[in-house]
Amino acid sequence: MAAYVLCGRIAPLCRTLKGISSSKSILSSNPQFGHLLQTASYNPKPLKLNLREPYIPDKDSEKTPEWQKTADYDRKLFGRYGSASGIDPASLWPSHEKLDKVIAEENEWHPSLEAMLKNIEAREKEEAEKRMAREKLIAANMAKMPKMIADWRREKRETKQKLKEEKDRRAKLLAEARERFGYAVDPRSPKFLEMVAEIEKEEKKKKKLMKRRLKEEQAAAPVTPPAASS
């Protein structure tokens, strides 16, 4: 029974292999598919890699890429192959200028604990001074506040008084113009403006005359002699 089952499983496999061999013979007999069969059955040999000798680029050659001529690439070669790279380790050490730059960057981005504490102390001191200056300014302004309020109220009263005086003067001029011309005059008319200029001229003349009389009266007044000391 077991032999019968085994023969039943092997039979399809034999038929498949027979079909492959027959198709291979057909392809080999046909010149059109002979090259295809030969290409498909090609088994190339693996490339021989030279893992013993390291690749050291020739820096004097024009074919060598520029990135293989840099100091960073030399560091990689020395780190990979060591003394076999033919690179002098002393040439890989940074110059004094570059070393100073690295140290400066290190101090800037990674300061010591003492430097960080000093920076914090200086910043806190600066903030305290600014806060005290601001508090002094607020206190000084608060001390000036009553006087500032009094001055504002006085200026407001003076402005209100000037507006009232200007309004009264304008009404008086309009009334005088109505009395002089016999009808209401437009304040923008040339007649009204000419009348105002004339009145202002007369007022200036009267003020000048009064000032002169006052000066003459002061000059004519008798001078009282000072009392004699006992």
Image: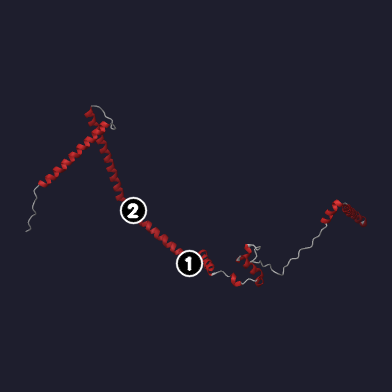
Marks 1, 2: nearer the viewer: 1
Expressed as whole percent of the image width and height from the top left, the position of residue 28 reads 87, 54
Nearer the N terminus, badge 1 or badge 2?
A: 1
* Residue displayed at 43% across by 62% down: 124
Expressed as whole percent of the image width and height from the top left, the position of residue 155 reads 29, 45
Which quadrant of the structure image shows residue 210? Answer: top left
Q: Dot 2 surroundings within 10 Å: few (below 14), some, or many (20 or more)?
A: few
Distance from the alpha carbon under mark 1 to that under mark 2: 39 Å
Expressed as whole percent of the image width and height from the top left, the position of residue 98 reads 54, 67
Q: Up-down: is 91 above or below 174?
A: below
Q: Which of 141/100 is in front?
A: 100
Image check: 12 left or right of 156? right
Give the secondary structure at mark 1: helix
Q: Which of 62/68 is in front?
A: 62
Count of number-bearing discs = 2
Residue under label 2: 141
Image check: 5 left or right of 150? right
Which quadrant of the structure image shows residue 14? Answer: bottom right
Which quadrant of the structure image shows residue 229? Answer: bottom left
| Numbered circle sitting on residue 72 | none
Residue under label 1: 115
- Give the residue type that dot 2 points to: Asn
- Give the residue type that dot 1 points to: Ala
